Amino acid sequence: MLNKTSESKVLRDPIHEYIHIEDQLIWDLLACREVQRLKRIHQLGTTYQVYHTAEHSRFSHALGVYEIVRRMVNEINGIDEILNEEDKIAVMAAALLHDIGHGPFSHIFEVISKVHHEDITQKIILEDSEVHRVLEKAQSGLSKVVASILSHTHPKAVLSQFVSSQLDADRMDYLLRDAYFTGTSYGKYDLERILRTFVVNGDKLTVKESGIHSIEDYIMARYHMYYQVYYHPVGRAVEAILIAFFKRWVDLTKSDPSITQRYPMFRFLLGKVELDPFYHLDESTCFAGFHMASVEQDPILKDLAERLLNRRLFGYVDVKNEDERNVIRQKVEKTYDSRYYFYQDEMSSRPYSPYQEDESLIYITLIDGTIKELSQVSNIVAAIVAAKPKDDKKVYFPKEIL
């Protein structure tokens, strides 16, 4: 039964002022251990080492995404023509659960484990878990519906658009939330204006022509946040050490299998991620492992652990070609093992792309009722699309070699 709560629940939030919960399913999902685990995962991974106030969690972001979707399904003009009440509760649940498969240190977990957080999210929703049991108790088959929204296989594609597209509740929350907690102004845009100008046109979620300027601000906010916050080189330097630490730990297991018994929190590095151990995998357990490693006999593992614990970060330089990279690598190899102390990083991103799947695009409803893709009606976005993507190539290494 998809029941309402006995009374409306409100949770204070610095971005949305209040998170409103009126559905018992959402309240019950919040209490699940898979959702509570997100309190122990930083939303921005290692970025708190750059912006010291970026301590917010994936839990608070999940609530923010839920709140935006809750407002969308209740406030968008014409939404009741394409969504029924079951659709609405399913997409709100999907919004709350969209990140439950994230491991420690944001997307670095995926680089290390070779497992995508979306796949773990699907397993948690569909297999034996507290989340799965709560969904099925509320309505038989609901777990499959929620999973299909997140995997973009639901027959009503607009539901996936709410949670995962180029103008979705996920991005709309994290831009504002990350800007707030990093103390930067780059990610600010007019959320209220965007929500007011959303309109359903046929089976598509679109934005009124009068809302184009707000969408342009949103696109530019995303562009600046990526290069000033998400791709910040100091944050990437921390990630380089994390990757080196985990690589060294795996290499040590080949000569000393007993290390897996001493460090159970790192066993996910050795094979596929199982759900039960995953529930206990968070940043606090990883840091317990770093503390243990800081007194290990192996000098490389010990040094990398101490660097993580005490913020002794790698330095970095921009490089244009392979020759420049090799010069730095050769300097590193005079003192260090380059397998762990030399890291190449290349980043490239567009704030908007008109070449993705149809449901991911941003559509504008013109005054005459016709629908156009955003870059066809916005000179600013058209210029962004036509411009060459900004490439960022760096190498990271111990500062001591310079």
Image: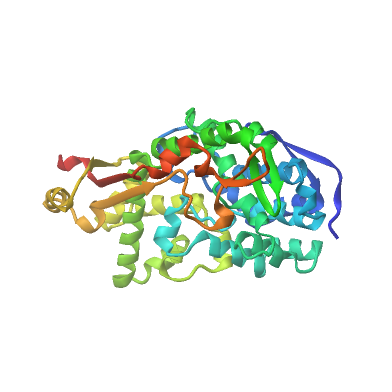
User: In which quadrant will I find the N terminus?
Assistant: bottom right
Q: How many marks?
A: 0
Instruction: Quadrant for residue 253, please give it.
Output: bottom left
Q: Residue at x 76, y 48 (%)?
A: 79
- Asked if residue 164 lies left or right of residue 223, the reply is right
Q: How is the image coloured?
A: rainbow
Instruction: Determine the image quadrant of residue 279.
Output: bottom right
* Residue shown at the point (62%, 53%) measured from the top left: 161
**Residue 111: x and y, percent?**
40, 59
Q: Position of residue 168 (x, y in %)?
A: 60, 46
Q: Position of residue 42 (x, y in %)?
A: 51, 45
Q: Is residue 106 visible?
A: yes
Which residue is found at the position 27% from the left and 46% from the top? 393
User: Residue 36: in sight, yes or no?
Assistant: no
* Position of residue 183 in the picture relative to residue 170 (left or right): left
Q: Is residue 72 above or below residue 35?
A: above
Picture coordinates of residue 232, whole percent (x, y):
37, 39
* Along the line of sight, the residue nearer the viewer: 372 or 162: 372
Residue in the foreground of this view, choosing between 295 and 231 = 231
Using the image, determine if residue 13 lies above or below residue 305.
above
Front-most of residues 129 and 378: 378
Q: Quadrant of the C terminus?
A: top left
- Which picture quadrant has residue 400? top left
- Residue at the far front in the pictured view: 368
